[in-house]
Amino acid sequence: MEIRVECYAGHRGEETPRRLHFDSRTVEVARVLDAWHGPDHRYFKLLGSDGATYLLRHDEPAGEWALVQFQRAERPGGHAEG
């Protein structure tokens, strides 16, 4: 699945995801849950406007993004949506 990520560059110039595009679907980033640097990539754990959790990997030198993990939102009663 191809992903396109719109970012906001903060005061330190580091890009932070604000909007995710999957084919014809767009998800707003409701909240950045975590962000960290790995040996070769930067990672972001995000809560989407759809209630799902996304883990993205950013290859900064290449400018490429990858969806590493996706977890659907849980509906009331403990069942995942979808």
Image (cartoon, rainbow, N blue to C red):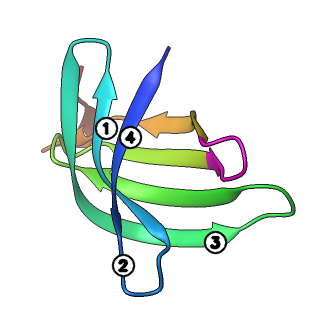
Going from the N terminus, do you reach mark 2 or mark 3 first?
A: 2
- Most common secondary structure along the magenta stretch: loop
* Label placed on residue 5: 4
| 9 on left or right of 48 | right
The image quadrant that residue 6 belongs to is top left
| Amino acid beneath label 1 | Leu
Q: What whole-number distance in Å separates the C-alpha atoms at marks 1 and 3? A: 19 Å
Q: What whole-number distance in Å separates the C-alpha atoms at marks 3 and 4? A: 17 Å
Residue with the mark numbered 3: 36
Q: Residue at x 52, y 48 (%)?
A: 55
Image quarter where the C terminus lies is: top left
Residue with the mark numbered 2: 10
Residue with the mark numbered 1: 20
The picture places residue 15, in percent across and down from the top left corner, at 45, 64
The picture places residue 67, in percent across and down from the top left corner, at 54, 34
Residue furthest bottom in the image: 11
Q: Which residues are magenta?
A: 58-63
Q: Residue at x 87, y 63 (%)?
A: 39
Q: What whole-number distance in Å separates the C-alpha atoms at marks 1 and 2? A: 18 Å
| Amino acid beneath label 4 | Val
Q: Nearer the viewer, residue 12 or 34?
A: 12
* Helix, strand or loop status at disc 4: strand
Going from the N terminus, do you reach mark 3 or mark 4 first?
A: 4
Going from the N terminus, do you reach mark 2 or mark 4 first?
A: 4
Determine crowd level at label 3: few under 14, some 14-19, many 20+ residues with C-alpha closer than 10 A. Answer: few
Q: What whole-number distance in Å separates the C-alpha atoms at marks 2 and 4? A: 15 Å
| Amino acid beneath label 3 | Trp
Determine crowd level at label 2: few under 14, some 14-19, many 20+ residues with C-alpha closer than 10 A. Answer: few
